[in-house]
Image (tube, rainbow, N blue to C red):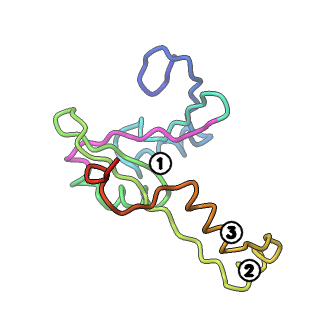
């Protein structure tokens, strides 16, 4: 039985919740009044992903601060209007800065590339004619 929707499913569903009831109630109040606000992890073999939480347009308007903090933690939301999904809220992936010295060290062991031969190989495999196909002579 799928915990998130109540329907039978072949995938195994694990609910991520705090250990004690007091902690769970505290976290539920922090996130919102909906007790199903906790993210659910679904496993369909080797892949795990967090299931998005549905929120109403009114929740988005009234609890925008809490929702923004949840986005900072990596949670995802689907906004609904009259029960119909109208938008997705996904956190932006953070870019990781790699110092120049580390990058050079990573590529230090890479093989040498003969750029003339590389260009010949690309030209032999890829059609790079800028003329649209409809106007080409056959």
User: Where residue 26 is drawn, which disc sits there?
Assistant: 1
Provide residue 112's location: percent of width, then percent of height.
78, 74
Q: Which residues are magenta?
A: 47-59
On the image, which quarter does residue 125 sit in? bottom right
Q: Main secondary structure of the magenta part?
A: strand
User: Where residue 117 is drawn, which disc sits there?
Assistant: 3
Query: How far is mark 2 from mark 3, CA to CA?
Result: 28 Å
Q: Which residue is nearer to you in this view: 117 or 32?
A: 117
Helix, strand or loop under label 3: helix
User: Where residue 102 is drawn, which disc sits there?
Assistant: 2
Q: Is residue 43 left or right of residue 25?
A: right
The image shows residue 30, relative to residue 42, as above or below, that is below
Mark 3 or mark 1, whichever is nearer to me: 3
Q: Which residue is nearer to you in this view: 31 or 1?
A: 1
The image shows residue 137, relative to residue 114, as above or below, that is above
Q: Which residue is nearer to you in this view: 6 or 93?
A: 93
Query: How far is mark 3 from mark 1, CA to CA?
Result: 64 Å
Point out the tag, 2 or 3, that comes first from the N-terminus.
Answer: 2
Point out the tag, 1 or 2, that comes first from the N-terminus.
Answer: 1
On the image, which quarter does residue 5 sit in? top left
Q: Residue at x 48, y 48 (%)?
A: 27
Q: Which residue is nearer to you in this view: 131 or 98?
A: 131
Q: Residue at x 60, y 30 (%)?
A: 43
Q: Residue at x 60, y 68 (%)?
A: 119
Mark 2 or mark 3, whichever is nearer to me: 3
């Amino acid at each position: 039985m799928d915990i998130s929707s109540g329907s039978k499913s072949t995938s195994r569903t694990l609910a991520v919740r705090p250990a004690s009831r007091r902690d769970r109630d505290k976290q539920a109040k922090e996130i919102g009044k909906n007790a199903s606000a906790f993210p659910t992890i679904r496993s369909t073999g080797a892949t795990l992903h967090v299931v998005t939480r549905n929120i109403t347009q009114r929740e988005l308007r009234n609890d925008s601060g809490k929702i923004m903090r949840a986005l900072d933690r990596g949670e995802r939301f689907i906004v609904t209007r009259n029960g119909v999904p109208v938008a997705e809220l996904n956190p932006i992936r953070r870019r990781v800065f790699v110092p120049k010295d580390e990058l050079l060290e990573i590529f230090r062991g890479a093989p040498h590339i003969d750029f003339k031969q590389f260009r010949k190989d690309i030209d032999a495999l890829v059609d790079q004619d800028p003329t649209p196909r409809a106007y080409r002579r056959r």
